Image: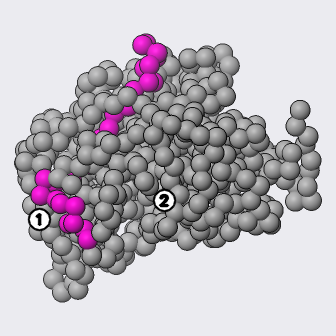
Amino acid sequence: MRSVVVTSLGVLTLAGLLVPPAEAAPAVHTPPPKEVKRPVAEGYGGAVATVDLDASKAALTVLRQGGNAMDAAVAGAAALGVTEPYSAGLAGGGFLVYYDARHRKVTTIDGRETAPRAMTSTALEGIPFAEAVSSGLSVGVPGSVAQWDLALRKYGTMSLRQALRPAIEIADRGFVVDQTFHDQTQQNADRFADFTPTAALYLPGGQPPPVGSVFRNPDLARTYRELGIRGPAWLYGGDLGREIVNTVKKPPVRAGATRNVRSGLMEVSDLRAYRALERPPTKVTYKGMDVYGMAPPSSGGSTVGEALNILEAVPKIGLHEYLEASRLAFADRNAYVGDPAYTRVPLGDLLSDGFAKERACLIGPRAMPHPAAPGSPDGSYSACASAAPAASAPEEKKEGPETTHLVVTDRWGDVAAYNITIEQTGGSGIVVPGRGILLNNELTDFTFGPAPGDPNLPAPGKRPRSSMAPTIVLKDGRPLLAVGSPGGATIITTVLQILVNRLDFGMSLPDAVAAPRASQRNTAATQAEPAFTQWYGAELTALGHTLTDVPGPPAGEIGAATGLEFLRDGKVQAVAEPARRGGGSALVVGTHR
């Protein structure tokens, strides 16, 4: 039996290894009794959690109208396209993990954007990242609408037209601008000002909308309304698609702007060729529970799953082991994961127990040399592979709060965990004239190169590697948890840390979400939130770890998670952030059975 010691820092230590105590996590405070965002809700008949109250209410409305979790997930995602337009929208994409209660199976729907057929492996070489972000060249073929259509046809009960109604209402009547929306607009104001339709929409009078004002998007309401009438073909080869292609090829740059805005490569034929794909999920068994995630081209499921396998193979689990397992899994992610239609991804071996044991034996009492070398997922595993560091590590881009995540369940027990994105906060910065939608800049997720052999180099029609990690955990074949987060590559570490907090450290789900975070992605220093450094920095530094501040924006924050936990007797706990990204919104259909 493990001995438990309380150190002078108040950190629980299992056999000398750092373990954050549940009681040390920030308290979740109940807001005053009015219509404000509440981060935790418990009840029956269905539940939802998003970053935004209006989006959560949109999904809940669908549940109360008799829709199922898939209907509500699409409605919530469309609503986030209104209220969180810098993170989500119909011109973006996403990954959805879904538990179908009737058939007791987990599936996934891949709505990831694709590169135009004119894009080559060298198309992004030599282009400064900042220039690629705000350009037509970075815009991928949108996947969200095709994903919504496939999801509803296969697993929903409503039409796309019905699912879009709550979002149309929000876009028409408007929503109250909060501090997060204002700040994100301010952070993007310089580049928004260089595109005439973007400035007209998001910088009225030349300034970000003030906190407390009502923001309306009638162009987006009309676009959603017409999409519901005309269907997905209006985008994938129809007139809306032509408007998007024209905007990509000739970005609407204001006269006198000095920004170097490159035109894009997308054609209407690229839109006609796009398909959302249903894929098998990744699956690992962790301490008797089945953990399902998103398979490539997302690296979320493979990297979270590999890290969990590594942790299960070590004798003790603490924060040191969490960081080291993440370091090793990221080394393998960078070396092997890409679009499986273009590169061989050894997914089975990456998620095998043999490979995990070989990687786990590299974890010692001190932080390993940087960078960790990738392993050899070749099916032949020894007692312990070499611990020699890799020759170099790829330079990572700055990670921020981009992307968003929602979770929803219904009265029948169906569960959706859904990451939606337009990539950078604000996407490409380009609004399609008269349509109220921001274009994505998803193709910046490709490796720019030169990088011979990199599995994530661009190619015609290829889907860029993602870090989105919507995750569903089953226990005894029934849903136990659903969780996910935004945050670029920190999505993976956020989901992993929440799972470790909940399943290994014994925290409640609200505490597991609220607890301070650290993100190790095979980098020389581990990014850590201030409270994490304050509580655990001294002891982790003594073990050879280097902690550094999270640059943001917003500075000092990693992720903005949402989750569900299935309690006894049919009760569900919906959980969102109490503070990060302004706090999230958790709602339930009813508080009594």
Residue found 16% across the figure and 37% down from its top: 232
Residue found 21% across the figure and 55% down from its top: 459
Query: Residue 401, labelled with which disc?
Result: 2
Q: Residues within 10 Å of mark 2 (few under 14, many from 20)?
A: many
Query: Residue 260, labelled with which disc?
Result: none
In this picture, which residue range is highlighted in magenta?
99-125
- Image height of 25 relative to 381, above or below: below
SS at circle 2 = loop
Amino acid tagged 1: Lys
| Residue 532 falls left or right of residue 63 | right
| Residue 593 falls left or right of residue 208 | right
- Image height of 277 relative to 366, above or below: above
Query: Residue 249, labelled with which disc?
Result: 1
Amino acid tagged 2: Pro
Query: How many numbered badges does the structure rendering display?
Result: 2
Which quadrant holds residue 163?
top left
Residue 549 horizontal/vertical position (percent): 63, 70
Q: Nearer the viewer, residue 387 or 34?
A: 387
470 in magenta: no
Q: Quadrant of the N terminus?
A: top right
